[in-house]
């Protein structure tokens, strides 16, 4: 029976988890799972129904209407399919970040998505990133990394990313949104953002993308034989 390796990467919004985890997965030949994209998809659906993503009474009835699947291109890019529609681009709009944070605070939503995430780890070598991967989703992961960066650096990175997509938003607005999201994610009752006790913390504030990926690769190779 094949034993699959699992790597959990957690950290605050804008820390570069998705970009770095995707690059690391490509280097290792692992399946990359962006759990944030899954929550964004749920938030997008709820918002499209005209419902308040922060209110469980409005969100929970939507769960029975949501059919999610993940597909992967030849480049390993994760595509989110919502009721047959590829919403990979739509979920990256800045407003959807708030929807994701709100629905992810609802315990029933997390339970709804938990088995999907764990099943991927049972069937593949995975690098999974999110807020509670090492603490809740994959507590037995062989490698746990808590990826962080200063709020100033995270805001600058997010600002550049949105400008490249043609979205106009001030740097200060993004900074304030990140601070508010950090507070929501860290203080929620359901699976709050926190560093697992056995996780290695990596601060990428002063690192380039390539330096960050190399640092991640070093951490992984110290813990598993690949």
Image (spheres, rainbow, N blue to C red):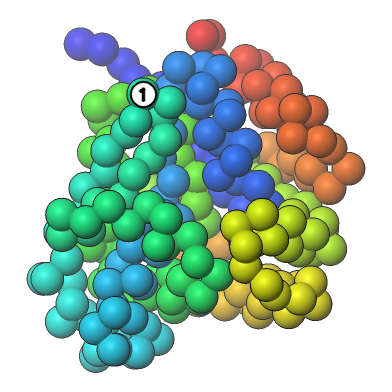
In the rendered image, the vertical position of residue 89 relative to residue 98, given as above or below: above
Q: Is residue 27 left or right of residue 49?
A: right
- Mark 1 falls on what kind of element? loop
Is residue 21 in view from this perspective? Answer: yes
Q: Is residue 172 left or right of residue 220?
A: right
Q: Nearer the viewer, residue 216 or 152?
A: 152
Q: Position of residue 112 (x, y in %)?
A: 22, 62
Q: Could you say which quadrant of the image residue 156 lies in?
A: bottom right
Q: Which residue position is annotated with label 1? A: 74
Badge 1 local density, few (<14 within 10 Å), some, or many (20+)?
Answer: few
Q: Position of residue 155 (x, y in %)?
A: 76, 63
Residue at x 38%, y 52% (from the top left corner): 88
Residue at x 18%, y 77% (from the top left corner): 62
Is residue 198 in view from this perspective? Answer: no
Residue at x 36%, y 72% (from the top left corner): 43
Q: Position of residue 55 (x, y in %)?
A: 34, 89
Residue at x 56%, y 18% (from the top left corner): 27
Q: Nearer the viewer, residue 139 or 219?
A: 219
In the rendered image, the vertical position of residue 140 relative to residue 223, given as above or below: below
Q: Residue furthest left?
A: 64
């Amino acid at each position: 029976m094949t034993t699959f390796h699992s790597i959990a990467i957690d950290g605050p919004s804008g820390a570069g988890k998705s970009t770095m985890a995707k690059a690391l997965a490509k280097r290792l030949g692992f399946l990359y799972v962006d759990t944030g994209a899954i929550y964004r998809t749920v938030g997008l659906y709820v918002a499209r129904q005209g419902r308040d993503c922060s209110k469980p009474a409005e969100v929970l009835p939507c769960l029975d209407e949501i059919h999610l699947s993940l597909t992967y291109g030849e480049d390993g890019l994760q595509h989110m399919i919502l009721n047959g529609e590829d919403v990979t681009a739509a979920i990256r709009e800045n407003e959807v970040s708030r929807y994701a944070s709100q629905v992810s605070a609802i315990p029933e939503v997390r339970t709804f998505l938990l088995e999907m995430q764990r099943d991927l780890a049972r069937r593949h070598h995975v690098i999974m990133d999110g807020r509670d991967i090492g603490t809740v989703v994959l507590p037995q992961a062989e490698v746990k990394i808590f990826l962080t960066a200063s709020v100033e650096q995270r805001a600058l990175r997010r600002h550049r990313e949105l400008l490249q997509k043609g979205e106009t938003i001030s740097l200060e607005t993004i900074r304030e949104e990140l601070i508010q999201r950090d507070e929501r994610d860290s203080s929620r009752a359901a699976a709050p953002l926190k560093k697992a006790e056995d996780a290695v913390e990596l601060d990428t504030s002063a690192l380039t993308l390539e330096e960050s990926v190399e640092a991640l690769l070093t951490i992984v190779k110290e813990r598993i034989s690949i």
